[in-house]
Amino acid sequence: MLKRRTFSKAVGLGTGAAALPLSGPPAQASAASGPSGGPAPAASLTVPHVVPGTHTSFPEMKHVRAGVLDIHYADLGPAHGPVVLLLHGWPYDIHSFVDVAPALAGLGYRVVVPYLRGHGSTRFLSSHTPRTAEQSAVALDIIALMDALKIHKAVLAGFDWGSRTADIIAALWPERVKSLVSASGYLITDVKAQAEPAAPAVEHNWWYQWYFATERGKKTMEDPHDRIALCRYVWTLVSPGWDFDDATFARTAQAFRNPDYAAIVLFNYRWRIGLVEGEPRYDRYEKLLAAQPDIHVPTLTLDAALDPFTPPGDGAGYRKHFTGPYEHRTIADVGHNLPQEAPTAFAQAVVDADRLGARH
């Protein structure tokens, strides 16, 4: 899931960070619109309150050949509206945004929600392509998707793997990013730094990463029944206050039946801790990312208060990496799957990040 070295919440949260309450619906959105017919970049634009779980599915999926993949994605809202890309994490899928996407589409945004490599109906074009998942490979998938859809620039918003992917694109290809929403802040991985031990309680949170490094973990991930059970267990640990039902999990769990799912997940977590080598084609990007590049695009970071991976300090631990216009929020009473647990807060962050981008 997230970048191990920054996660010290397990050893104490007492920093006095203010959290945004989620009780009560926000005010109705402004009817103003921008020159493209989409939402105006005004501070008064407010996302109408959406109850989590209001939506259970997306419209008919689309797909496009992009880079090494045939990427399947949901596409909501007006075709010529300002574009938002919503990027999911592990162990999740596009249903993390099942309430966020229509809320944004209703405000005039074109919302694109792709399945990442190894997830859902996204497939590799060739059986000969190595099933790797170093961080730059996933980011380049999204660049390829933007190119295939002729999207020059978009608001990027994600959590977990999605935050990392959006952070990388913002750092290496800032011309493609109007603004950024990054749950859990700065997640670009420095593999060398990952070799250093963290506090015991932090290491405990990462039990599944060490499990995936073993033959037992590999066998679990390669068995569809066992990996689905493991993923559900992870949901309960990282979102302790989320009372999701069987149907909610089952909709997402279908994405875990992708034939490349085990290979992609195992590679990603083993690669992060230096157990496997990435593809040479990505080496130049990984060298840049190892330097922990700053992000200059307008950014709004989110922390989920009940997420065991949220570091203390109200974003202070990663603040230095964001050098452009910046806002930070801690969202009360939600865990790791922030957009699905708190869709109104996440959608509002997208709107407000877009406003930051329009101002600069």
Image (cartoon, helix red, strand yellow):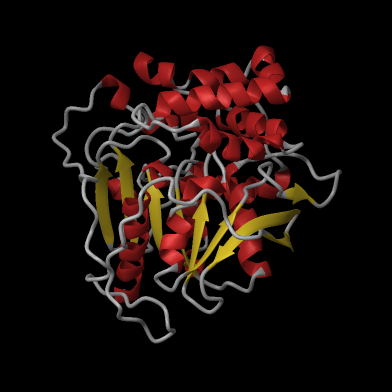
Residue 333 point in image, percent of width and height: 27, 36
**Which quarter of the figure is the C terminus placed in?**
bottom left
> Is residue 172 or residue 114 the one in the foreground?
114
Residue plotted at (47% across, 41% down): 160
Residue plotted at (49% across, 17% down): 207
Quarter residue 59 falls in: bottom right
Count of marks overlaid on the render: 0
Where 92 sits versus 227, above or below?
Answer: below
Q: As drawn, is 225 to the left or to the right of 232?
A: right
Q: As drawn, is 107 to the left or to the right of 246?
A: left
Residue 196 point in image, percent of width and height: 45, 23
Residue 217 point in image, percent of width and height: 64, 17
Q: Determine if residue 328 is in view.
A: yes
Q: As drawn, is 354 to the left or to the right of 162?
A: left
> Is residue 148 or residue 199 the one in the foreground?
148
Q: As drawn, is 29 to the left or to the right of 59?
A: left
> Is residue 89 or residue 105 the one in the foreground?
105
Residue 46 point in image, percent of width and height: 27, 65
